Amino acid sequence: NEKDIVKYSNELNRLNMSDLKEKELELFYAICCQLKNRGTDEIVIDITDFKKAFNISNKIDKKRFKEYIKSVHKKFGELKHTIETENEIITVIFFKKFVTNIKENTMIISVNKEYSYILNNIVQYYTQFSFKEYQSLKSKYSKILMPRLSQWDSIKKKEFKKEELFEILGVSENYRSKIVNFNNYVLKPAITELKNIFYDLKVKPIKKSTKSSKNEIKSYLFTWAEKPKEIEVAEEVKTLEISKK
């Protein structure tokens, strides 16, 4: 289903999404589905239809919904990326316009023109994944990792430097200073969930010796495999022989 596919230029994976919660991450990628191949046009989203199309919970009263939307506006307004060329350094906020009309039950959204290439006419260097599969993930950490692993699905491996992974996931100081906590409470649960999407997913810590430690983790290598095609098994036909007697 084309509407279910989230597709964008790999550049979008550079946005820091570590402050977003699980449902905010879902909302962001659902909006990306709606903005796909719409250029810099303003799109008007009927919130009821949108929730239904993307199976987003409708069991939230108007007061709580308004508080949720206020939080979304603040965080989405901070989603920015610095683009560096030979002659310029440009910091661009992703959304040019993000209006939620509570009374009319609509959202009016457009992206900045500097970012319009990210969701339009993409032919190479892109990330794509199923929104339904994305929505099946429960952990914030697995939701942040899935798009970044999907970017490398053609070669089925990706190495992250340890500090880079900490930044991407936005892990607390407790996890940064105690690597055993990071492994047990962040990495392992995320990998368990992501194994349902990335076949035979494994993560290997890459270690190196330093002056202070012989086995300090330098980076994490994620690897996975092509999902085997299901083999159709011919149904066995059994015949019952009846004795002539």
Image (spheres, helix red, strand yellow):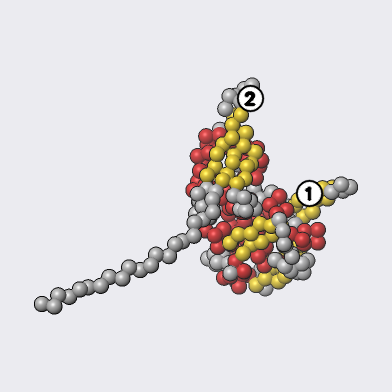
Q: Residues within 10 Å of mark 1 (few under 14, many from 20)?
A: few
Please determine whether, in this image, residue 55 is positioned above or below residue 114. Answer: below
Q: Position of residue 48 (x, y in %)?
A: 60, 72
Residue at 75 percent of width and 57 percent of height = 94
Of the residues shown, which amino acid type is indicated by label 2? Thr
Q: Residues within 10 Å of mark 2 (few under 14, many from 20)?
A: few
Query: In what quadrant of the picture does the C terminus appear?
Result: bottom left
- Farthest residue, direction left: 245
Judging by the rendered image, the residue that carries numbered circle 2 is 210
Residue at 13 percent of width and 78 percent of height = 244
| Residue 223 falls left or right of residue 10 | left
Residue at 64 percent of width and 59 percent of height = 128
Mark 1 vs mark 2: in front: 2
Q: Quadrant location of residue 241? A: bottom left
Q: Quadrant location of residue 242? A: bottom left
Residue at 71 percent of width and 71 percent of height = 44
Q: Position of residue 1 (x, y in %)?
A: 58, 69
- Farthest residue, direction front: 244
- Farthest residue, direction bottom: 244
Of residue 68 and residue 236, the one placed in the foreground of this image is 236
Judging by the rendered image, the residue that carries numbered circle 1 is 82
Label tally: 2
Distance between the Cα atoms at labels 1 and 2? 33 Å
Of the residues shown, which amino acid type is indicated by label 1? Thr
Q: Position of residue 98 (x, y in %)?
A: 73, 63
Label 1: state its secondary structure: strand
State which tag comes first along the sequence, 1 or 2.
1
| Residue 152 falls left or right of residue 89 | left
